[in-house]
Amino acid sequence: MPEKPSLYYALFSPPARACILTAKLIGLDIDLIAVDFSKKEHLSPEFLKLNPQHQIPVFVDTDGEVYVDSHAIICFMVAKYAKDDQLYSKDLKRRAHIDHRMHYENGVLFQVIKDIVARNIYGGEAEFNARSLELCHNAYASLEQFLNQGSFVVGNELSVADISIHTTLITLELLVPIDQERYPEINGWLQRMQKLLPDYEDINLKGAKALQQRILSCMAEHKANK
């Protein structure tokens, strides 16, 4: 059996970055294994054995058990390896709210990125679609309301929900800037998170910029071909 868990990742992926940052926050030493999408490594037989859905991240624990989906992974890592339950509370009331915010990230916020990728990378659209922008600002408005209730997305303590939402949000923010007057709570939260998250520039921002550049370069190519 391996001495430490492994995480299959690509830095451009917000969910993968959420796993890396969570591991760093709880002091978990993991073996990072990069998956090169340009070489279609996510479609290789070896990777498909780990995750038939051919998605990252994938977490392989020391006993060989495989876990997929960033939300499941970060909750598992905290439950098994963290020194306390601050990031994913054992208190059922708080945990339910944390779960809700992660469902928001997956079902609302991350869907904006998926919509943009579908339209502006694969769909040939050279400008941001009005529907994408509407979805984005609806997501921002919901997050602003969450943050009206405390310093973090659930009350006044950092949780895995903050990490998950943040990795997605900073990618979107590079594409659809978050207006400071319209969303003051989000902007304040972003500043707090930047101070709290480890290796912010090298992991989170670097990965977000990689996806941003991919989207913008595709949009420029679509525009040139029209």
Image (cartoon, rainbow, N blue to C red):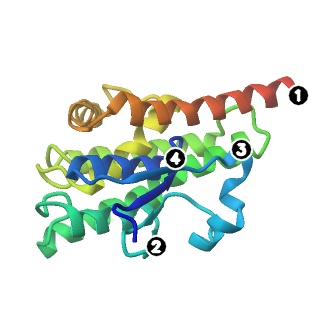
Q: Give the residue type that dot 4 points to.
A: Ser
* Residue 174 visible in the displayed image: yes
User: Where residue 131 sits: x, y (%)?
Assistant: 61, 46
Q: Which residue carries the number 1 mark? A: 225
Q: Residue sitting at 49 percent across and 52 percent down?
A: 110
Q: Residue sitting at 23 percent across and 47 percent down?
A: 25
Mark closer to the chain start, 3 or 1? 3
Q: Which mark is residue 64?
A: none
User: Where residue 203 sits: x, y (%)?
Assistant: 40, 36
Q: Which residue carries the number 3 mark? A: 38
Q: Which residue carries the number 4 mark? A: 13
Q: Residue sitting at 80 percent across and 31 percent down?
A: 222
Mark closer to the chain start, 1 or 2? 2
Residue 33's place in the image compared with 91, above or below, is: above
**Callout 4: few (<14), some (14-19), or many (20+) C-alpha neighbours within 10 Å?**
many
- Report, in whole angstroms, how far the alpha carbon at label 2 lies from the one at label 4: 19 Å
